[in-house]
Structure formats: C-alpha cells, structure tokens
Image (cartoon, rainbow, N blue to C red):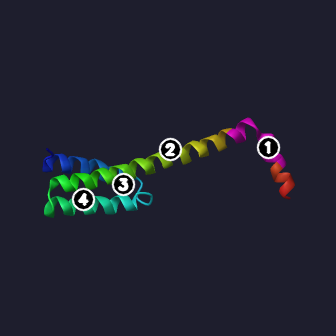
Amino acid sequence: MFTHMDFYRITFALNSVIYENKAMFSRSQERLKDATALADSAGIERAMRSLIRCEKNIEENIALLFKTEAIRRWEEAEKILFPERFVSNTKEGS
C-alpha cells in the first residue's frame, strides 16, 4: 500500500528530472500534473499508476538523451580520429 508521502517523494524526484530537461519532458510534466490531481481526487493507488506511466516516459526520454549524447560524442571523436574524412567531404562540397 502506498502512502501520500511515497507519492510526493516520487513526484519530487520526477519533477527534478523534468526541470533539468524541460523541453524534452513536457509530456512527462503533464502526466505528473495529472497524477497529482488524481492523488487528491481519485485515490493514491490510481495516482501511483499514473506516476508509473510518467516514470516510463521519463526513462524513454533519458535513453534518448544518452543515445543522442553518445552519437554527438562519437561524431566529435570521429573528427579527431579520422580528420581526412571531414577534409575530403568539405572539398567535395565546394
């Protein structure tokens, strides 16, 4: 059985993640607002299910963030490791 304190602790943690990456997590933020409204009106069990959906959405976004960050880092490393690839691409484009 969940308590309101459990709910608000999780809400605070999820809100922190959302705030850090506001643009990417706008959908999660809406789900979190919905869960908070449910906690007050429909009961804590239903609100916790809503939080779980919100948390899964945040996990997906975080995976995407890491993926894009990894790609960006690889591209930076590739420029250092294989500068000739980028020099020839620039010459061909001229």
> Which of marks 2 and 4 precedes in the sequence?
4
Give, as a single range, the part of the protein colored magenta.
78-88
Per the model, the C-alpha gap separating discs 3 and 1 is 38 Å
Quadrant position of residue 43: bottom left
The residue where tag 2 is placed is 66
Identified by mark 3, the residue type is: Ile
User: According to the image, label 1 marks what residue?
Assistant: 85
Q: Earlier in the sequence, mark 4 or mark 1?
A: 4
37 or 73: nearer the viewer: 37
Which is in the foreground here, disc 4 or disc 2? 4
Q: Of label 3 and label 1, which has the lower sequence position?
A: 3
Dot 2 or dot 3: first in sequence order is 3
Q: In x, y percent, where is residue 90?
A: 81, 52
What is the crowding at mark 3: few (fewer than 14 residues within 10 Å), some, or many (at least 20)? many
Few, some or many residues within 10 Å of mark 2 (<14, 14–19, 20+) = few
Secondary structure, mark 1, is helix
Q: Residue at x 33, y 54 (%)?
A: 54
Depth order, front residue of 51/23 = 51
Q: Assign a secondary structure to mark 3.
A: helix
Residue 37, percent from left and from top: 20, 63
Q: Is residue 84 left or right of residue 67?
A: right
Left or right, 57 with respect to 82, comes to left
Q: Along the horizontal axis of the image, is 60 left or right of 94? A: left
**CA separation, marks 2 and 1?**
25 Å
Q: CA distance from mark 4 to mark 1?
A: 50 Å
Residues at discs 4 and 2 in contact (Cβ within 8 Å): no
Q: Look at label 2 and name its amino acid.
A: Phe
The residue under label 3 is 18
The residue singled out by tag 4 in the image is 35
**Residue lying at 86% horizontally and 54% vertically, measured from the top left:** 92
Is 61 drawn above or below residue 37 in the view shown? above
